């Protein structure tokens, strides 16, 4: 599992995940992921376009950090999940907790609103 971070400006952070979000993948990136979600009022986009599989522990990684961000006045959004990952997220009701977007511009606009 790989994690890439970039600052998009306007206080928006982009975390791109690549690989498999199973127990081993989550263990590899969990601390670093949480670090990028820290601070006051963080606006975090999580790019899932290169994630090929998501287990329940991957969902926990996303929801735990999204809830933590929300308690500090920030927001998280998911960006462009692969079809298989999108199906898993939709079946578990994640979009009601963390909104999903197909393109970067839409996601940025919602985070900044």
Image (tube, rainbow, N blue to C red):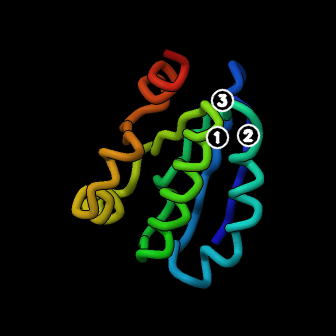
Question: Which secondary structure lies at badge 2?
Answer: strand
Between 27 and 85, the residue placed more toward the observer is: 27
Mark 2 or 3: in front is 3
Classify residue 19 as left or right of residue 88: right
Taking the spot 48% from the left edge, 54% from the top edge, the residue there is 48
Circle number at residue 44: none
Q: CA distance from mark 2 to mark 3?
A: 9 Å
Q: Earlier in the sequence, mark 2 or mark 1?
A: 2
Image quadrant in which you'd find residue 30: bottom right
Circle number at residue 14: 1
Q: Position of residue 76 (x, y in %)?
A: 53, 40
Q: Where is 45 relative to 68, above or below?
A: above
Q: CA distance from mark 2 to mark 1?
A: 5 Å
Identify residue for label 3: 12
Farthest front residue?
71
Q: Position of residue 84 (x, y in %)?
A: 30, 65
Q: Quadrant of the N terminus?
A: bottom right
Identify residue for label 2: 6
Question: Which secondary structure lies at badge 1?
Answer: strand
Classify residue 91 as left or right of residue 63: left
Contact between marks 3 and 1 (CB within 8 A): the answer is yes
Contact between marks 2 and 3 (CB within 8 A): the answer is no
Q: Position of residue 92 (x, y in %)?
A: 27, 63
Q: Earlier in the sequence, mark 2 or mark 3?
A: 2
Contact between marks 2 and 1 (CB within 8 A): the answer is yes
Classify residue 93 as left or right of residue 101: left
Taking the spot 43% from the left edge, 71% from the top edge, the residue there is 54
């Amino acid at each position: 599992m790989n994690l890439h971070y970039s600052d998009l400006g306007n206080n928006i952070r982009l975390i791109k995940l690549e690989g498999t979000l199973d127990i081993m993948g989550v263990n590899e990136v969990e601390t670093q992921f949480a670090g990028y979600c820290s601070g006051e009022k963080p606006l975090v986009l999580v790019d899932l376009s290169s994630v090929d599989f998501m287990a329940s522990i991957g969902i926990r990684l996303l929801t735990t950090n999204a809830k933590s961000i929300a308690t500090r006045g920030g927001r998280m959004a998911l960006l462009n999940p692969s079809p298989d990952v999108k199906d898993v997220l939709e079946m578990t009701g994640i979009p009601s907790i963390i909104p999903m977007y197909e393109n970067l511009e839409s996601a940025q606009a919602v985070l900044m609103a």
